[in-house]
């Protein structure tokens, strides 16, 4: 699943503060930033 947002860094911080289990943002093979989310 792919989700888009306007500001990945800001969204990452907001989600982490809410307890969402995320890996830190990283540069993807295609050159953009991405974050991996674990869903249970």
Image: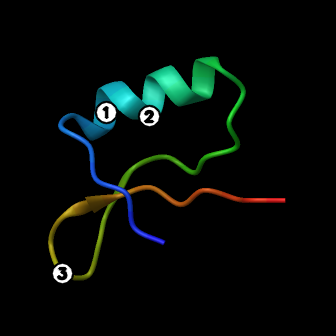
Q: Residue 6, position in %: x, y?
A: 18, 37
Which residue ends up furthest to the right in the rendered image? Answer: 40
Compared to 35, does 6 lie above or below? above
Residue holding disc 3: 30
Q: Is residue 1 left or right of residue 25?
A: right
In the rendering, at what x and y percent does residue 24 appear? Answer: 49, 46
Query: Residue at the location (48% across, 72% down)?
Result: 1
Residue that carries the numbered disc 1 in the rendered image = 9
Crowd rating for badge 2 (residues with CA inside 10 Å; few <14, some 14–19, many 20+): some
- Mark 3 or 2 closer to N-term? 2
Q: Name the one closer to the observer, 3 or 7.
A: 3
Kindly report the distance in space between the C-alpha atoms of the residues bearing marks 2 and 1: 5 Å
Label 3 crowding class (10 Å Cα cut-off): few <14, some 14-19, many 20+? few
Tell me whether the residue at label 2 lies in contact with that at label 1, contact meaning CB atoms closer than 8 angstroms.
yes
Question: Image height check: is 21 above or below 15?
Answer: below
Q: How far apart are marks 3 and 2 (CA)?
A: 20 Å
């Amino acid at each position: 699943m792919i989700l888009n947002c306007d500001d990945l860094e800001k969204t990452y911080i907001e989600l982490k503060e809410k307890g969402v289990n995320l890996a830190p943002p990283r540069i993807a093979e295609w050159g953009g930033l991405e974050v991996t989310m674990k869903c249970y």
